[in-house]
Amino acid sequence: MLELVRVYTKRPGKKADLNLPYVLHRGQTVIDAARLVHKDFAENLRFARLYRAEQGSAPQGMMVERSHVVEDGDILEFHM
């Protein structure tokens, strides 16, 4: 109803912290999520790896570009 999505982050080689999501508006992108984490992430981001909390909807660890639209429950691993 509010058109919001929850996005989680993880560090390479670590598990995702599913307790504290970043909240974005539906239609926002990976770069928007990176900007919420830290402005340097957005400026230096090369790509992100996408994991989904629910298996089967996307290959786990799929490399996505900065312009990829995030969905509710996405887990992003940022690479500079």
Image (cartoon, rainbow, N blue to C red):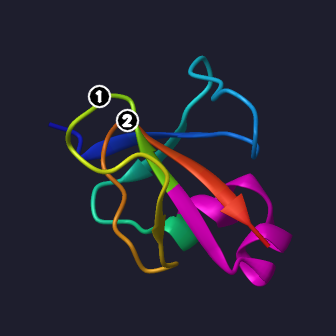
Q: Residue 58 at x, y = what percent? A: 27, 50
Rendered position, 22 above or below 53: below
Give the number of the disc on residue 10.
none
| Residue farthest along the left direction in this orientation | 1
Give the residues drawn in magenta, as a range. 33-49
Left or right position of 38 against 31? right
Residue type for callout 2: Gly
Figure label count:
2
> Which residue is label 1 attached to?
54
Rendered position, 46 above or below 19: below
Q: What predominant SS class does the magenta segment belong to? A: helix
Say if the magenta span includes residue 40: yes
Q: Residue drawn at (67%, 66%), measured in percent from left and top?
A: 35
3D distance between C-alphas at marks 2 and 1: 8 Å
Rendered position, 55 above or below 12: above
Quadrant of res 62: bottom left
Rendered position, 65 above or below 11: below
Q: Are marks 2 and 1 in contact (CB under 8 Å)?
A: yes
Q: Secondary structure at mark 2?
A: loop
Q: Secondary structure at mark 1?
A: loop
Say if the magenta span includes residue 44: yes
Mark 2 residue crowding within 10 angstroms, few (<14) / some (14–19) / many (20+):
some
Q: Residue drawn at (56%, 21%), measured in percent from left and top?
A: 18
Left or right position of 76 against 44? left
Q: Residue 1 at x, y = what percent? A: 14, 36
> Which residue is label 2 attached to?
73
Mark 1 residue crowding within 10 angstroms, few (<14) / some (14–19) / many (20+):
few
Name the mark nearer the viewer: 2 or 1: 1
| Residue farthest along the right direction in this orientation | 40
First in sequence: mark 2 vs mark 1: 1
Q: Quadrant of the C terminus?
A: bottom right
